[in-house]
């Protein structure tokens, strides 16, 4: 099978093109040895199957982040048959910088000149013929979001597979060209994973990975040290030459209007990103998202899943009894599996609706504005503006949220972003909030959910400020972010994003949560002879041992205690365990009633504060270990949120009690 790599700047439409090419024939994993996401898919053309690899979005192919290293290593070492370089036609100069680096590497490039409709709306005229001749590679106009030019791109890509890539000869000026030649000669007898010319160029740029590769090559090291001794630094000169090359091309191929066109995006941004209205509008939008989540997810869709689980439980119980199954098996399946996992699955409609609206905000381009709007606040507490992007990702799941911090170049910013991300309410905590809201705040669900999420953001900012003043002192780096134009959300893209997140939630409910529930069910019915789910069971005794710790916070029951500790394995397990220990209830309404009987309004608020802030799940702690390469920080992540959450939960309950709530 032949391989096609997709590479391009962020917001160039690369992922949209990947989805159009591969459809549902795609899967997601991680690149070997790193935490960068790997997307692969395939498509058929005239009976042949082609593999497509969606490389991380990047502005360049340096060595400043894992994204850049993964992209360039695959292009050089992975030997793709063709590299489709997705270029944003509205920002040709900036995008062609990456194209220049691809050509330097000798890649077999096909340029997909994407978003041509937006370029035309700005009266930007681009001659694809002249651009193709100037670059020496095929250039094909596309509008991936509307599936325009896709067949032409496929035809051009497959044609390029059968042709030798044209060798582009760049000149960086006499002095630099001579230095490249000298280093290339020193490298010719060495066994390198990269082309000699390109390696020599990267060494002159001061590329850290390349410098580590030649660490044991004495002649090369001696030559580079002599350049350092002479205070010679070619990096900026090389960058200038690339941009000069790009500017020369765009002057020949692009015609822009005399005056810049004010687009609809510009007009909308004057309001949505203004200092006066930006933050209130962001808050209002998120509040409406949570209100719609409850109206649509609970009032309209909520009852269907609960009814289905009830019918399923009755059917399975009847079938098990009819085939003479032992009582313990019936108990495990109905009270353990259906009661535990079912208590989580009943909230799938609300999770689905929340992810649907968040996907719409992402697809329209508004989430990038949210990060821009929050930059001033992030700066005020000593954080990098880009940190908020990883925080937004954390709303889906804290694992990719922590992984998203790899785009931060400053170590201080990255470490702080990692340590505060678990305060972002991931989708796994949503069932906990929802069942307590249904029990105590049924008429104000959207408002309460909004307050919980806002509290998480507030605590993240507060701890970020504390960490920046204590553990990680130093200056933050500059915040540079591109705001893509507003677009109508693609139904396919929105539904795919929603489905991926919901399906991941369902898989966790059927695997991790089931394993946790199975273990705790065994503990809840042993030793033999005790009443199941009682204080005399092993689980009850463990819970009683833990419970005094939470008594000052108002929920010192063994059921609440074991559910919280089960949540360290997976946050969804909190509701699953509550559903099991309260007599194996399988219906959402039964669990709500059980919780209403076991908590007061004040202790429920205290419990919500605890679940919002306490120790993240095991997967998050493992990710922290992998990202920081330190057991110390993994242990810190396990301990400090628990201490903080417990302290605040106790504070809420004790102050509330003194005030008579």
Image (cartoon, rainbow, N blue to C red):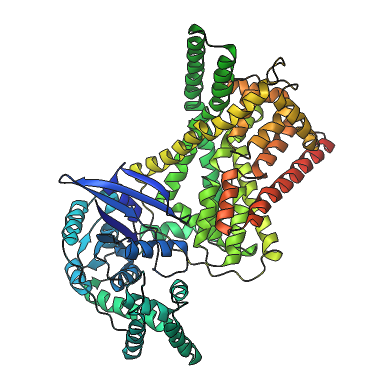
**Where does the C terminus fall, quadrant-wise?**
top right
Residue at 56% from the left image edge and 51% from the top image edge: 623
Q: Give the percent coordinates (x, y) of residue 49.
A: 22, 47
Q: Between residues 343 and 37, which one lies in front from this camera angle?
A: 37
Relative to 545, is 167 above or below?
A: below
Q: Give the percent coordinates (x, y) of residue 483.
A: 43, 60
Q: Is residue 615 left or right of residue 657?
A: left
Q: Is residue 647 visible?
A: yes
Relative to 282, is 329 above or below?
A: above
Residue at 60% from the left image edge and 44% from the top image edge: 618
Relative to 452, is 274 above or below?
A: below
Q: Give the percent coordinates (x, y) of residue 293.
A: 51, 36
Q: How many labels does the image show?
A: 0
- Residue 387, quarter of picture: bottom right
Q: Give the percent coordinates (x, y) of residue 254.
A: 24, 71
Residue at 64% from the left image edge and 35% from the top image edge: 566
């Amino acid at each position: 099978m032949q391989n096609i790599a997709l590479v391009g700047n962020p917001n160039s439409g690369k992922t949209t093109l990947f989805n159009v090419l591969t459809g549902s024939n795609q899967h997601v994993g991680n690149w070997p040895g790193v935490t960068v996401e790997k997307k692969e898919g395939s498509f058929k053309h005239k009976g042949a199957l082609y593999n497509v690899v969606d490389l991380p979005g990047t502005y360049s192919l340096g060595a400043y982040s894992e994204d850049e290293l993964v992209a360039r290593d695959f292009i050089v070492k992975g030997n793709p048959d063709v590299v489709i370089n997705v270029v944003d036609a509205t920002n040709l100069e900036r995008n062609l910088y990456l194209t220049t680096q691809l050509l330097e590497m000798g890649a077999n490039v096909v340029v997909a000149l994407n978003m041509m409709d937006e370029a035309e709306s700005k009266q930007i005229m681009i001659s694809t013929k002249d651009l193709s001749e100037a670059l020496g590679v095929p250039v094909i106009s596309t509008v991936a979001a509307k599936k325009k030019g896709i067949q032409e791109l496929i035809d051009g890509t497959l044609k390029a597979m059968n042709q030798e890539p044209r060798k582009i000869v760049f000149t960086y000026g006499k002095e630099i060209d001579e230095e490249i030649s000298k280093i290339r000669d020193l490298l010719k007898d060495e066994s390198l994973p990269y082309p000699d010319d390109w390696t020599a160029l990267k060494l002159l740029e001061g590329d850290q990975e390349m410098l580590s590769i030649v660490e044991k090559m004495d002649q090369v090291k001696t030559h580079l040290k002599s350049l350092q001794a002479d205070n010679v630094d070619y990096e900026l000169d090389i960058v200038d030459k690339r941009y000069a090359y790009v500017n020369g091309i765009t002057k020949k191929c692009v015609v822009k209007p005399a005056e810049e066109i004010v687009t609809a995006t510009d007009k909308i941004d004057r309001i949505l990103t203004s200092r006066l209205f930006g933050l209130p509008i962001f808050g209002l939008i998120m509040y409406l998202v949570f209100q719609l989540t409850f109206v649509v997810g609970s009032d309209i869709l909520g009852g269907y899943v609960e009814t289905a689980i009830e019918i399923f439980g009755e059917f399975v119980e009847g079938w098990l009894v009819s085939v003479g199954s032992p009582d313990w098996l019936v108990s495990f399946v109905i009270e353990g599996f259906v009661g535990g996992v079912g208590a989580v699955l009943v909230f799938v409609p609300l999770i689905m609706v929340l992810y649907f609206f968040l996907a719409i905000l992402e697809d329209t381009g508004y989430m990038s504005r949210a990060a821009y709007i929050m930059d001033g606040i992030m700066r005020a507490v000593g954080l990098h503006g880009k940190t908020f992007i990883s925080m937004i990702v954390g709303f889906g799941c804290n694992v990719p949220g922590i992984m998203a911090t790899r785009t931060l170049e400053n170590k201080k910013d990255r470490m702080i972003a990692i340590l505060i991300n678990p305060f972002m309410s991931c989708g796994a905590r949503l069932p906990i909030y929802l069942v307590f809201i249904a029990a105590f705040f049924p008429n104000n669900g959207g408002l309460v959910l909004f307050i919980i999420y806002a509290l998480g953001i507030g605590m993240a900012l507060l701890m970020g400020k504390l960490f920046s003043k204590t553990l990680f002192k130093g200056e933050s780096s500059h915040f540079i972010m591109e705001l893509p134009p507003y677009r109508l959300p693609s139904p396919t893209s929105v539904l795919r994003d929603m489905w991926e997140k919901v399906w991941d939630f369902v898989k966790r409910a059927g695997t991790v949560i089931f394993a946790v529930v199975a273990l705790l069910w065994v503990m809840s019915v042993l030793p033999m002879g005790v009443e199941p789910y009682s204080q005399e069971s092993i689980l009850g005794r463990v819970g009683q041992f833990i419970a005094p710790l939470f008594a000052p916070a108002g929920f010192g029951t063994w059921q609440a205690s074991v559910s919280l500790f089960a949540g360290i394995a997976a946050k969804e397990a909190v509701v699953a365990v509550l559903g099991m220990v309260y007599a194996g209830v399988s219906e959402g309404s039964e669990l709500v009633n059980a919780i209403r009987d076991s908590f007061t309004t004040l202790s429920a608020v205290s419990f919500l504060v605890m679940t919002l802030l306490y120790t993240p799940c095991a997967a998050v702690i493992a990710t922290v270990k992998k990202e920081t390469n330190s057991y110390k920080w993994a242990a810190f992540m396990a301990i400090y949120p628990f201490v903080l959450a417990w302290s605040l939960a106790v504070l809420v309950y004790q102050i509330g009690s003194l005030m008579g709530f």
